[in-house]
Image: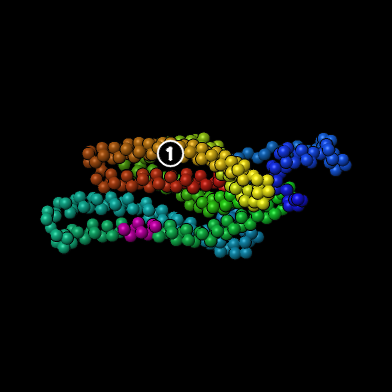
Amino acid sequence: MLFTGRVTPVVRRWMSRPSLWQDCCRPALITGSAFSTAPPPKSTVPAEKDEPSERDYNYRMLRLLGKHLWPTASMAPDSRELRLRVLGSCGLMVGSKLITIQVPFIFKEIIDVCHTDLVTTGEAGQTLAEVAAEPSFFVPAAIVLGYGVARSSAVAFSELRNSIFSTVALRATRQVSLDVFTHLQARELQFHLDREIGTLSRVMDRGGRSINSALSSMLFSVVPTALEIGMVSAILGTQFGVAHSAVTALTVGAYTVFTINYSNTRIPIRKEMNDAENEAHQRSIDALVNYETVKYFGAEKLEEDRYNESLVKYSEAAQRTQKTLSILNVGQNVIFSAGLTAIMGLTTASIVSGDATVGDLVLVNGLLFQVGHRLCCVFYTGGQVPELVV
């Protein structure tokens, strides 16, 4: 039986088995210069330069994505529209931040008004209609209504921002994906003969999904979060003193340093998990695409064992990734809880001394929780960039 198909990884593995190919088609037993066993001549190609470092790759990728945030006319015919969308998204982001920062202040006013007015003037056992008829109820009711409007407006601004910016993000995803596909089409023949379809499809899919997160992180997470932290620290320092501002700064600093340092130790584990996933996907696709070859050599059990080996490696790496992620989350919560406890203790002392109200305790809690939430979002979206670089 003559096999005329293309030499694929599966075929090459089976051609390397002495029992099937080397004993029958050993080059030393075949005459002719085409099957000469002489060692190949030494390569005259100069040695390749050292590979760029991971930091260089990250910088190049971020610079590439930055071009798509502010495209030129040569990159996109509708670059003017895309730039206007970026500016509109930034404006909505600023509006959302300003409204969000006001929500804890409105909540504080609700607590203070209810504590000073309604509790002192109201009577026990009143019905809802009787309470609503009280003149003192109008002010806190209006503040509560403003609280709901503020929260809804902040969410509406954020969603409108995402809707406007999605055109820019999807355009960048499409262009980068097209560039990658064009690059693959231009590769040499040997690259395509290897037919690493599974690995390529997995990496392209993972990178495409990460582009949107990377762009949003660059524009809407890092710089706005830094500004929000500065605003919160200034507000706390102005209204409550230097101690509150210092606790906030120390909490954010410890949270950031711990997250960055521990996340760097998780990168090799994450890469190992991605490599194992790519390998498993490649082996499954390779075996299915070359189904007739596997059947011809009766290699079903061998391919199943190789696929299971990759799955085991992926499972072990995924378990280590989850364990380290749990440790990271616990450490972050311990640091944040310690800072929150310290700043609320300071506020409680101010309430006892008469320098603050009960609403101030709610204000401090809300402001610090907003900062913690933004930090969590920044480091989560930042974790998508390494997957894009891969």
Q: Residue at x 43, y 59 (%)?
A: 159
**Picture mark count:** 1
Secondary structure found at label 1: helix
Of the pair 259 and 35, the residue shown nearer to us: 35
Q: Position of residue 162 (x, y in %)?
A: 47, 58
**Main SS class of the magenta portion in the image:** helix
Q: Amino acid at mark 1?
A: Ser
Magenta span contains residue 358:
no
Circle 1 residue: 326
Q: In terms of image quadrants, where is residue 170? A: bottom right
Q: In terms of image quadrants, where is residue 390? A: top right
In this view of the protein, can residue 63 be seen by the observer?
no
Q: Position of residue 53 (x, y in %)?
A: 63, 39
| Left or right of 199, for residue 156 | left
Q: Position of residue 218 (x, y in %)?
A: 52, 50
Q: Residues within 10 Å of mark 1 (few under 14, many from 20)?
A: few
Of the pair 321 and 340, the residue shown nearer to us: 321
Q: In terms of image quadrants, where is residue 333? A: top left
Residue that protrudes farthest toward the right in the picture = 32
| Left or right of 308, for residue 158 | left
> Colour scheme in the image?
rainbow
| Left or right of 18, for residue 70 | left
In this view of the protein, can residue 23 be seen by the observer?
yes
Q: Residue at x 39, y 44 (%)?
A: 372
Q: Is residue 77 above or below residue 39?
A: below
Q: Residue at x 60, y 41 (%)?
A: 306
Of the pair 212 and 26, the residue shown nearer to us: 26
Of the pair 39 and 36, the residue shown nearer to us: 36
Q: Residue at x 22, y 53 (%)?
A: 113
| Left or right of 289, for residue 342 | left
Q: Which residues are magenta?
A: 148-155
Q: Position of residue 54 (x, y in %)?
A: 60, 40
